[in-house]
Structure formats: C-alpha cells, structure tokens
Amino acid sequence: MSKSKLASKYNEVIDSKSAYEILTEKMEEAAKREEKGESEEKEEKKSTKKEKGFFDNPVVKSMTRTAGNSIVRTLLGVLGLGGRSRSRKSLF
C-alpha cells in the first residue's frame, strides 16, 4: 500500500488549520478594521453636514411624481397604449 501512487499523494501532511479557523481569523481581522473605520467615519460625519436639496421637500416630490405620471399617461394615450379601452363610453 505504501508503494501506491495514491498513497504518495494522500499521505502528505498539509496545514492542520481547518477552514473554520481560517474564516474565524478573517472575520476577526475584518471586525477590527471596521471598528477603526467607524471611528474615523463618525468624526467625518460630525464635520460634514448634509444640505437639503430642492427635491428633498415632500411637496416637491409629490408634484414631480404627479407631473411625471400625467406626462407618461398623455404620451401613452397618444400612442394608443393608454389604460382605458376604446369601447368604454363617457357618462356625459
């Protein structure tokens, strides 16, 4: 058995660390880097204050959405792809 080609290949001693140990080490290193990064980010966030833009106002958002919807509906209606069918008749 010791003269076998397979025995020479599989009897080699490889690193005894398991995948679990390797992954645990990587996770710990990432956590340490993240902690260092968070402390730096907090300092940066305190110094920079986000300015509110024109489109952050809820009224402007609503108006923009309404205008966009009406434009799309008009274009689809012109193309004949509107939501209403042609067989529907008006009440007036």
Image (cartoon, rainbow, N blue to C red):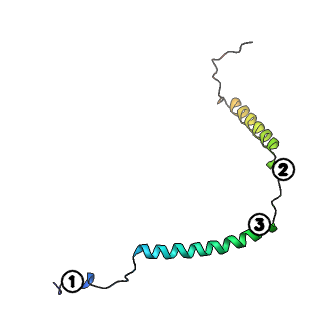
User: From the viewer's perspective, is 1 left or right of 51?
Assistant: left
Q: CA distance from mark 1 to mark 3?
A: 62 Å
Question: Tag 3 or tag 2, which sits nearer the N-term?
Answer: 3
> Within the image, what quadrant is residue 31 found in?
bottom right
Q: Nearer the viewer, mark 1 or mark 3?
A: 3
Q: Amino acid at mark 3?
A: Lys
* Marking on residue 54: 2
User: From the viewer's perspective, is 79 left or right of 29?
Assistant: right
Q: Residue at x 68, y 70 (%)?
A: 38
Residue that mark 3 sits on: 45
Instruction: Find numbered disc 3 in the image and state the secondary structure of the residue it sits on.
Output: helix
Q: CA distance from mark 1 to mark 2?
A: 74 Å
What x and y, as percent, mark residue 9?
A: 26, 83
Question: Tag 3 or tag 1, which sits nearer the N-term?
Answer: 1
Question: Tag 2 or tag 1, which sits nearer the N-term?
Answer: 1
* Marking on residue 71: none
Residue that mark 1 sits on: 5
User: From the viewer's perspective, is 48 left or right of 16?
Assistant: right
Q: Residue at x 65, y 17 (%)?
A: 88
